[in-house]
Image (cartoon, rainbow, N blue to C red):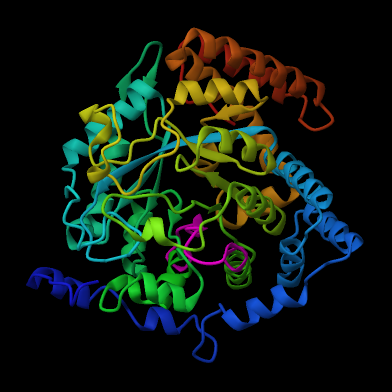
Amino acid sequence: MNGQLSYDSSETNWMKNVIKEDEITRYMENGKDFIDDEEIWKKIERNKAPEPQKVRDILQKSLAVETLEPDETAALLNVEDEGLWEEMFETAGEIKRKVYDNRIVTFAPLYCSNLCVNNCLYCAFRRENSVEKRRRLTLQEVKDEAEVLAGEIGHKRLIAVYGEHPASDANYIADTIRAIYDVKVKTKNGYGQIRRVNVNASPMSISDLEMLRDVGIGTYQVFQETYHHETYQQVHPAGTLKSNYPWRLYALHRALDAGVDDVAIGVLFGLYDWRFEVMGLLFHARELEKRFNGIGPHTISFPRLEPAANTPFTHESKYKVSDRDFKRLVSVIRLSVPYTGMIITARERADIKKDVIPIGCTQTDASTRIGIGAYSDRYSEQEAERQQFILGDTRSLDEIIGELAGMGHITSFCTAGYRCGRTGEHIMKLLRCGQEGRFCKLNAVLTFREWLDDFASEETKKAGEKIIKKELDEIEEQTPSIYQPSIYPKLMEYYKRIEDGERDLYF
């Protein structure tokens, strides 16, 4: 950063009131946060060259859907034998199927504003980046974006993304959530509507989060970016809101205290050593579980650092993660926090996603555009000056669903659990015992049938119907051993009603 950033008076006054010190210190123990850099490195060093039997014992614990201890995760990170890594990949995939079955959830990011008071070295949205084209969507423009996503592409859930700025504060976020939920668009056979609005935004106060809870926020996602204190300070220059490490670290504590049931953590891999960051994610998950009656992260994200317009840091980092290590870190996250959802994003190339999804991923974005107003503006190429970074996978939702079907995955558009109260502590219990997957299997079939009829190309529809037949046969076979005898007839009734044009039927 060249000198002190310049802010106008309205920005300065707003920034003075964002951070609430008492909403940091109340969560600390003896004035310290829960990430001890030295302790993490000691655990990584202490668990070098683990015995194969020790590793296999740890895998059995993961299969029981139990969160690992830090020393156990450190042991996994230190595995060197390629054959043992293959066992870890296989076990990670088995856990994913045990907890989530063969479902993949899709979503789209909707960037509402790239105005930002921060100056993060790795981000094209940073304040001093003069080449970035700045914009905040009006509420009508937000609706226009949602209409394309819901009415033309067929998404049922979004993650709305905002820069940290007074023009995109909690009031604006609340207004955009309402605007998105208001959209209802006629489609080929039914209607398109966004049923779940997740939010990726800056850390907020408890009172602001209570307001978002009341307007129906889905999952609240805040990435620590890096858990390493020194690196955090280096990439988030002093004098910015984001330079306050503990304010960000305890963002999800405040959300849970505000009654936002589902929270999500993540790391931007490439800022610091990937092994340390995996340990940081585990410590964060365990801290949430300890504080909030077993409620851990609803999802964990693991994006890699990607090039961004006029952002030299993205090319210079010495901690970039190779494809080999990326697959390893994904598997260790799945093994360490076995109940959590795992999001692989369009930052990754299509071939990487295809390789990594079977070992633990449960969600991916599709038809992704990350420029402000990019869906309704309909420009075809990536424009670096309009977006936060360069995408690796720009395929359509239809193409991605077709590929997933070929891999044996059913794409689920289900949001029923959230509307039925299967959130927070409730969903954590269901995930740990494998019951959530049973509910979601039924709703995945119904929502996939809905999407195929309303949006799919003929080729994708054929591939999807093969998966649906397989799922229906499996559900029938599992009745009454797993499902109550009344479930299958009810499922087939709903299925027929959806084929006849009804929408949004669920268990």
Span of residues in magenta: 256-278
* Location of residue 233 with respect to 492 vertically, above or below: below
Along the viewing direction, whichever of 103 and 127 lies nearer the viewer: 127
> Position of 498 compared to 161: left or right?
right
Q: Is residue 36 visible?
A: no
Image quarter of the N terminus? bottom left
Q: Is residue 380 magenta?
A: no
Q: Which of the 4 image quarters holds residue 424?
A: bottom right
Q: Nearer the viewer, residue 91 or 290?
A: 91
Q: Identify the residue at image location x=44%, y=62%.
A: 317
| Residue 145 visible in this rendered orientation of the protein | yes
Q: Quadrant of residue 126?
A: bottom left
Which of the pair 260/88 is nearer the observer? 88
Q: Quadrant of the C terminus?
A: top right
Q: Residue drawn 82% across and 47% down? A: 87
- The image quarter containing residue 49 is bottom right
Q: Is residue 177 above or below residue 166?
A: above
Find residue 434 and report its horizontal and vertical position in percent: 73, 44
Q: Position of residue 444 (x, y in %)?
A: 59, 28
Percent position of residue 469, x then y: 68, 14
Left of 85 or right of it: where is 222? left
User: In the rendered image of this protein, does residue 267 appear above or below residue 439?
Assistant: below
Asked if residue 93 lies left or right of residue 395, the reply is: right
Frontmost residue, 437 versus 79: 79
Residue at 53%, 92% in the rendered image: 30
